[in-house]
Amino acid sequence: MPMQYEYTAIPEAQIPRAADPVFQHLLDTYASETNKVVSLWRQFGPENMGFKPADRSSTVLEIMKHQLLSERRFFAEFIGLGGEPEAAALLPQDLSPEGFWRRNQELCTPRLARMADRDMKWWLEVVPFFDVQRERIWVFWRRVLHTTHHRTQLSVYLRLLGKPVPSSYGPTADVTWKGADPTRSVEAAGRK
């Protein structure tokens, strides 16, 4: 049985088909990572938005704001996807976890359609990225890794708050399912 989420922001049926099938994994991965972010953000309550584990850490609210703002910048400025809302209109009116996860879902869903019609030439074009030049596909994967980094931060925050940590790539101490097979032994790692 595959992983089951309490809520799926972007169901598989809503993921468009890539014009060039070799890039379908980009769309599938972006939808999957969005689902993981939304699943995680749904675990926080309004009372948790000011939480941070150390003085120099960011709060939950600051990380959620950063996720929306920086993802928009990656897609608008660096990847050059087009169709992004103005930065001033990006953050939700309701600065609660629900306001943020709903806004994240609203922003991510149409990006899939805009990415779907891009061809190999577009994905492999070299574009400015901060003070260097990189292929768009490299910038896209950097965005996915950046999102994963902040999702991991907030997973630790959930654990520190005593809240359940949802599954991301496999079972957690809080979520498992029949057939889940985490690699925690030499025997499991040695399987072919």
Image: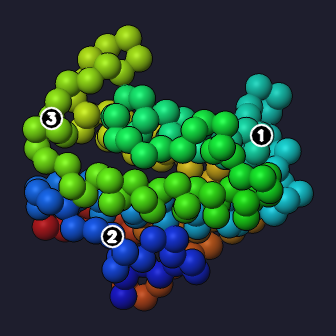
Instruction: Name the quadrant containing residue 192.
Output: bottom left
Q: Which mark is residue 124?
A: 3
Instruction: Name the quadrant containing residue 188.
Output: bottom left
Instruction: Name the quadrant containing residue 132.
Output: top left
Disc 2 + disc 1, Cβ < 8 Å: no
Residue 125, placed above or below residue 180: above
Circle 2 sits in a helix, a strand or a loop, which is it? Answer: loop
In the rendered image, residue 146, in percent from the top left (x then y), is placed at 47, 38
Q: Quadrant of the N terminus?
A: bottom left
CA–CA distance in space, label 3 to label 1:
36 Å
Please state if 187 lies on the left or on the right of 101 as rendered: left
Badge 1 crowding class, 10 Å Cα cut-off, few under 14, some 14 to 19, many 20 or more, is: some
Task: Check disc 2 and report the residue beneath it.
Answer: 15
CA–CA distance in space, label 2 to label 3:
22 Å
Residue type beneath disc 3: Leu
Looking at marks 2 and 1 on the same chain, the residue that comes earlier in the sequence is marked by 2
Task: Check disc 1 and report the residue beneath it.
Answer: 59
Please state if 92 lies on the left or on the right of 131 as rendered: right
Residue type beneath disc 1: Thr
Q: Residue at x 49, y 65 (%)?
A: 35
Q: Residue at x 68, y 56 (%)?
A: 100
Residue 178, placed above or below residue 154: below
Circle 3 sits in a helix, a strand or a loop, which is it? Answer: helix
Q: Which mark is residue 116?
A: none
Between label 3 and label 1, give the one nearer the viewer: 3
Please state if 117 lies on the left or on the right of 162 as rendered: left
Circle 1 sits in a helix, a strand or a loop, which is it? Answer: loop
